[in-house]
Amino acid sequence: MAVNEPEMLAAIAASSTLEELEKLRVAYVGRNGLVTQQLKAVGKLPADQRAAAGQAANAMRARVDQTLAEREVVLRAEEVSKELAVPVDVTAPGLTPKLGHRHPVTMVLDDLVDLFWQMGYQVVEGPEVETEWYNFEALLVGKDHPARDTQDTFYLEEAHLPRTHTSAVQIRHMEKHRDNLPIRIVVPGKVYRNEDEDPRHSWTFYQLEGLVVDENIGLSDLKGTLETMVRGVLGDATELRLRPNYFPYTEPSVEMDATCANCHGSGRVENETCRLCYGTGWLELGGAGMVHPQVLQNVGIDSDKYSGFAFGFGPERIATIKYGVGDVREFWRPNFKFLEQF
Ligand SMILES: [Zn+2]
């Protein structure tokens, strides 16, 4: 195909807008442009002609590129001066940008992280896709352990899974810092389970998990910490109750309840049964316990010398209590009418 260089350079010089210039750029040096085709054609020439033809085609490409670049500078400058020439009406009303705000669950999570930060905790994050070892086995939940049923989840290839709890991060952190104790961390993050959705359950949700490992750590330290936490987030009058429970990775294990934020523990509001706690006066918040000595040994920490406690709960649960939301799924629906209330 014949390529007329003077014609191309003249067309570039005559272009009057950036759009026009862009069309010429595509037509000449684009993937199927005239100059590009000329360059490609060099390879098909007899060997003794290739060097000279290649040099000529490359030189032409350089001249076309340069002319395009120079014309672009001129056209851009013209465009700017055109914009500046339009008079500005300084009396016209301004455009108020629509400002969003933090998501209610993020607000609760931030409050909690702040609270623990004030108590000297470090905030640690970890991967959302875990190995079975970190998610289950290091936490004493073997392949056939019944506790796996309660954390049924989705599996990926090669024994990986979306984490079912943030506890896996505790293991990773202890492994890394076992020679640098004490440990005081909180781990916020998303977790995934194969759950049927209902007003209190969702297949993806947030957790905030805490871990302390030091010498002479006892259950009383755990209780004091959780009390400070529930009062900080639900109000000073909130009482904490610990009930015995079972988790494979803590011994002893407890369930933590707080007095109901709606009826303040009485179970009744204006002579009606409280709808938040169903009249019990208590709200279940999450689980906790003393780290099982075997878990410490799994990561190479001397369990005769050191002990620790761990706890975990759901920020969504606390958000439903704090804001009086009846259905946890509301938080993750794209419903701006709902979200704008907060
Ligand atoms: Zn209540």
Image (cartoon, grey):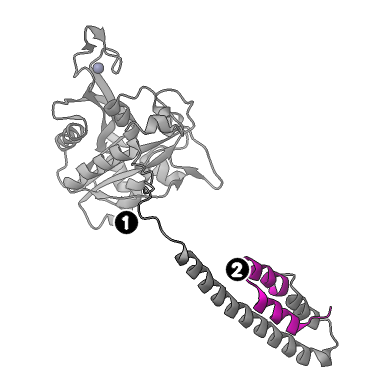
Q: How many marks?
A: 2
With 236 as the anchor, is 134 left or right in this view?
right
- Depth check, mark 1 against mark 2: the one in front is 2
Q: In the rendering, at what x and y percent does residue 14 appear?
A: 67, 76
* Residues packed near mark 1 inside 10 Å, few (<14), some (14 to 19) or many (20 plus): few
Q: In the rendering, at what x and y percent does residue 59 appear?
A: 69, 88
Q: Is residue 15 magenta?
A: yes
Choose between 121 and 318: the one closer to the eye.
318
- Residue furthest out toward the top: 271
**Can you identify the residue that label 2 sits on?**
18
In the figure, 211 relative to 271: above or below?
A: below
Q: What residue type is labelled 1?
A: Lys
Q: Determine the main secondary structure of the stretch shown in magenta.
A: helix
- The magenta stretch is 1-29
Q: In the rendering, at what x and y percent does residue 186 appear?
A: 27, 45
Work out which quarter of the rendered image holds the C terminus and state it. Answer: top left
- First in sequence: mark 1 vs mark 2: 2
On the question of residue 134 being in view, the answer is yes
Q: In the rendering, at what x and y percent does residue 169 appear?
A: 35, 47
Calculate the distance from the C-alpha at mark 1 to the C-alpha at mark 2: 56 Å
With 52 as the anchor, is 203 left or right in this view?
left
**Can you identify the residue that label 1 sits on?**
176
Choose between 231 and 250: the one closer to the eye.
231
